[in-house]
Image (tube, helix red, strand yellow):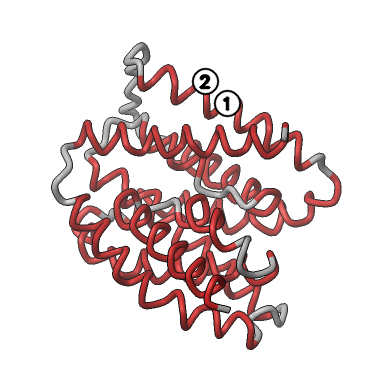
């Protein structure tokens, strides 16, 4: 029991710190600990709940950068994509999708971190933004990876760190809230989830504050590199989990 509590606290603290710093990454970080403490059926809604808490906590810091007209196509596309992805889940080779996405992330982030590709897309196209959101929602329903495409797309747009974060954090918050509601409707927010959440919640709040403190001290370029490194780690994790 003490080990389970320690793992829940460590996962919540590290996951919330990464979320407070980048606007995403709770699951990527926390699940390393949580899957050794609770079953996946508890860990999945716990990721959603703690992510929502951490993102709501950091939302006031980027509220000034939120452009709802810019954000709307991503969110609408994402909300349409999640049920489609859920429908496709039993019909697609999920492991192959995760492996391919992992390879794509490794190549993309490796090139960007080496500074060989500095493409900046300045033309606004709401249809493309909506398609990116739709793709993100589908990936969320299929593999729980809703944020990857919007994060990459926002990183290519030449926006400031607050503008980038406002887009993918607003998108992730919307999708994760939808997922959490789905878990609740499905009866998965049970007593075991409630006990885990009570343990993880204080560490989530503390970790998120720490990540936000560091975020405010980052330059646009440094923030971009941290996001790329987080995505690179996600890519390596996806490939490793499907090879090992």
Q: Is residue 35 left or right of residue 26?
A: right
Q: Residue at x 69, y 78 (%)?
A: 188
Q: Residue at x 37, y 15 (%)?
A: 117
What percent of the width, then of the height, locates residue 83?
Answer: 70, 59
The image quadrant of residue 40 is bottom right
Q: Which residue is mark 2?
A: 107
Q: Residue at x 40, y 49 (%)?
A: 168
Quarter holding the N terminus is bottom right
- Residue lying farthest right? 91
What percent of the width, then of the height, locates residue 239?
Answer: 64, 32
Circle 1: is it few (<14), some (14-19), or many (20+) Cα within 10 Å? Answer: some
Task: Report the number of numbered marks.
Answer: 2
Q: Toward the viewer: 219 or 203?
A: 203
Q: Toward the viewer: 172 or 79?
A: 172
- Residue lying farthest top? 116
Q: Is residue 203 left or right of residue 243?
A: left
Looking at the image, residue 151 lies above or below residue 85: above
Q: Which residue is mark 1?
A: 104
Circle 2: is it few (<14), some (14-19), or many (20+) Cα within 10 Å? Answer: few
- Residue lying farthest front? 2
Looking at the image, residue 114 lies above or below residue 69: above
Are the residues at dot 2 and dot 1 in contact (C-beta closer than 8 Å)? yes
What percent of the width, then of the height, locates residue 147?
Answer: 50, 47
Label 1 element class: helix
Q: Residue at x 76, y 34 (%)?
A: 96
Give residue 235's mark.
Answer: none
Whole-angstrom CA distance, mark 2 to mark 1, is 5 Å
Label 2 element class: helix
What percent of the width, then of the height, locates residue 220?
Answer: 20, 36
Quarter holding the C terminus is top right
């Amino acid at each position: 029991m003490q080990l389970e509590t320690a793992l829940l606290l460590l996962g919540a603290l590290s996951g919330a710190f990464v979320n407070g710093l980048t606007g995403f990454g709770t699951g990527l970080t926390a699940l390393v600990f949580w899957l050794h403490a609770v079953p996946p059926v508890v860990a999945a809604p716990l990721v959603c709940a703690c992510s929502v808490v951490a993102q709501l906590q950091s939302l006031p810091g980027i509220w000034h950068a939120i452009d709802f007209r810019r954000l709307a196509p991503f969110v609408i596309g994402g909300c349409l994509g999640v049920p489609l992805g859920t429908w496709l889940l039993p019909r697609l080779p999920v492991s192959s999708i995760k492996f391919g996405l992992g390879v794509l992330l490794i190549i993309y982030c490796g090139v960007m971190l080496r500074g060989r590709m500095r493409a900046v897309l300045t033309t606004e196209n709401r249809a493309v933004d909506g398609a990116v959101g739709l793709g993100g929602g589908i990936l969320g329903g299929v593999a729980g990876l809703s944020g990857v495409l919007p994060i990459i797309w926002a990183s290519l747009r030449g926006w400031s760190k607050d503008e980038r974060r406002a887009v993918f954090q607003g998108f992730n918050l919307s999708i994760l809230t939808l997922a959490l509601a789905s878990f609740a409707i499905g009866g998965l927010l049970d007593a075991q989830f409630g006990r885990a959440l009570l343990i993880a919640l204080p560490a989530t709040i503390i970790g998120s504050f720490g990540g936000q403190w560091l975020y405010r001290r980052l330059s646009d370029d440094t923030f971009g590199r941290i996001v790329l490194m987080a995505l690179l780690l996600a890519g390596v994790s996806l490939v490793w989990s499907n090879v090992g």
